[in-house]
Image (cartoon, rainbow, N blue to C red):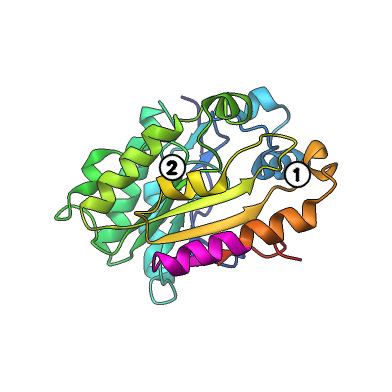
Amino acid sequence: MQTITRKSLLYKSEVEYADFCINHVEGCSHGCKYPCYAYMMKRRCGIIKTYEEWCKPKIVSNALELLDKEIPKYKNKIKYVHLCFSTDPFMHEQEQVCDLSLKIIDKLNTNNIRCTVLTKGIFPSELGNRNGYSNENEYGITLVSLSEKFRKNFEPNSAKFKDRIDALKYLHKKGFKTWVSMEPYPTPNLIKQDLMEILGAISFVDKIVFGRLNYNVKSSEFKYNKEFYNSLALTVIKFCRKNKMDCHIKQGTQV
């Protein structure tokens, strides 16, 4: 795998449900075609030139060294560190990425900094070792469908939905807090599906984040966008209340 170096790593997030964040990889082999917001931003800035380049991730070779310098600087300001917003920490079938992510989580935990982690890959079983990683870590998966046909079209190189759920359920049974990001949730002209069926498959988690699909031409052409997302957001809220789960509806989802 190719590598890059950076001058800094930890940064204060501007996302409404996150604190500090870290992105220790450039690009993502999952190749999501919603389209991917991170890819669009990197291409707009000229950092990434093509989709093919984006799908060949580059690891930040000096990530651990940067953390050794930055943790003392930010430690008193950090509530937790999120992995990741512009890449995937457990990128499917990318062993080097996964190994570095485990080392980063371990380093942060050793410094009494808890982590929240989000992936479209599969969580390694070693994260379930409560003696090895912080009991306060929270683990989440992105899940917007149960259809493998949809996944292959929109998240072509990501892990199967069932495998994601099974790995998350394992960590939940080990006593860790778990969550699901249902974003970007597709409109019916992209796929007709039962939201309650998806919610039923993840009813064991502690929190659900729900958000609309943006930046997609076909989705924007759907005639009843406003009504659709307002209705689904209310369904998610009611489901979470009934099952005593935390719920976060992303800004702009309800109008």
Q: Position of residue 47 (x, y in %)?
A: 69, 38
At label 2, the amino acid type is: Pro
Instruction: Mark 1 vs mark 2: give the one in front.
Output: 2
Q: What residue sits 54% from the left and 42% below the top?
A: 87
Q: Foreground residue, 202 or 38?
A: 202
- Horizontal side of 226 relative to 159 (left or right) equals right
Q: Foreground residue, 74 or 229?
A: 229
Q: Position of residue 235 (x, y in %)?
A: 58, 60
Quadrant of the rendered structure where residue 101 is? top left
Q: Position of residue 206 (x, y in %)?
A: 37, 61
Circle on res. 45:
1
Q: Foreground residue, 1 or 252?
A: 252
Q: Residues within 10 Å of mark 2 (few under 14, many from 20)?
A: many
- Horizontal side of 69 relative to 156 (left or right) equals left
- Residue 241 forms part of the magenta stretch: yes
Quadrant of the rendered structure where residue 95 is? top left
Residue 247 vertical placement versus 161 (above, below):
below
What is the chief secondary structure element of the magenta stretch?
helix
Q: What residue sits 60% from the left and 29% below the top?
A: 150
Circle on res. 199:
none
Q: Position of residue 77 (x, y in %)?
A: 44, 76
